[in-house]
Amino acid sequence: MLLQLFSYLRVAYVASVIESRHKLLPIRDCVYHHPLETKLFEGLNKSHTGIFVHWGVYESGKSTAVKNMGLRLQDEGRSVILLHGYNFEGRLSMYSWLRNCIGVSDDSNPMSTYFRKPTTIVIDHFDLFLSSYADIFEFLRELAVESAFSGKFNVLLVVTSWEWAVKLRDNGCIVIGSPSRWTGDELAEVFSTMPQVLHEKCQDKHEVLRVATLSGTPGFLTMAAHGAGVCSERASIIDREWHMGIRALEGKSLDTDEGRFPDINGKFHWEDLR
């Protein structure tokens, strides 16, 4: 009896530490909310289990969208655990890495034992693991089984490589919110929310919006607003990634389609700008 009570109290304590450790704080000065946030929120809020993947090109605002989505899920009473591929630690397995980042002790209990509320695990920049661990797909299969069996959590993987998005989809992950290319109207709206001092640094607003629209991302607005130049060649490369990724997800890839920004190994081919 005492042993059972001790085990219950220990699980409750670890669960409370996890919830406190991973609680998301609001993003300061976030005025514009892209429709992608709602797509992700609605999909993950109604699907309590499953492994999902979201793909968007470089600088398309994925990290901001998933953070805001996570805040909305949190407001709905879900626990959200937001992890990043940059938090790389040398672990023998992907599952060991995940448990360590969440804060689950290395014991025999399934990870979901410590989730007291419906939970969403988000791994942003997931590409960074895909060439580092050999057990990625085995890990995802195990995670999917635990998700379905426990009914306690779902997972969102966020990637920049459309080639990996296709591989993940073909290995059982559910594509969500992709593609989510920014329109000219959306970019003009987010540009209008920037402080006036940043507007004054933009030498040619119309050219900035033209290039940003070509790229389908807000990244060029941020660079231009801080006095950096705009690069049509780079926007064209990102535009090409959109087209290749969309074709791939629709099963219409061309023989010449190959990721370049980044490629499947995570390399960004900056030499293509020449």
Image (cartoon, rainbow, N blue to C red):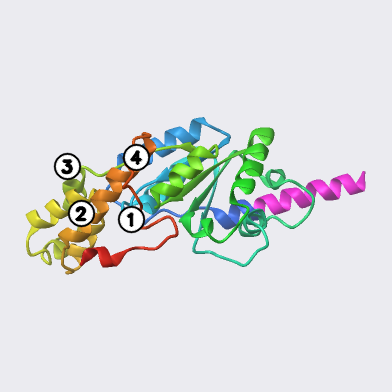
- Local packing at callout 3 (Cα closer than 10 Å; few below 14, some 14-19, many 20+) is few
Viewed as shown, does residue 184 lie left or right of 268? Answer: left
N-terminal-most mark, 1 or 2: 1
Residue 58 disc label:
1
Q: Which one is in front, 265 or 7?
A: 265
- Local packing at callout 2 (Cα closer than 10 Å; few below 14, some 14-19, many 20+) is some
Q: Which one is in front, 118 or 220?
A: 220
| Rendering quarter of residue 195 | bottom left
Name the residue tied to disc 2. Answer: 236
N-terminal-most mark, 2 or 3: 3
Q: Residue at x 15, y 54 (%)?
A: 211
Taking the view exactly as shown, the residue that stands out farthest to the top is 46
Residue 205 disc label:
none
N-terminal-most mark, 1 or 4: 1
**What distance separates the C-alpha of mark 1 from that of mark 2?**
12 Å
Taking the view exactly as shown, the residue that stands out farthest to the front is 255
Query: What residue type is disc 2 on?
Result: Ser
For the question of whether residue 69 can be seen, the reply is: no
| Closer to the eye: label 3 or 1 | 1
Residue 253 disc label:
4
> Which range is magenta?
1-16
Residue 53 rendering spot, x and y as whole percentages: 47, 43
Element at badge 4? loop
For the question of whether residue 54 can be seen, the reply is: yes
Q: Residue at x 29, y 66 (%)?
A: 270
- Whether 88 is drawn above or below 154: the answer is below
Residue 185 disc label:
3
Quarter the C terminus occupies: bottom left
Element at badge 3? helix
Query: What residue type is disc 1 on?
Result: Tyr
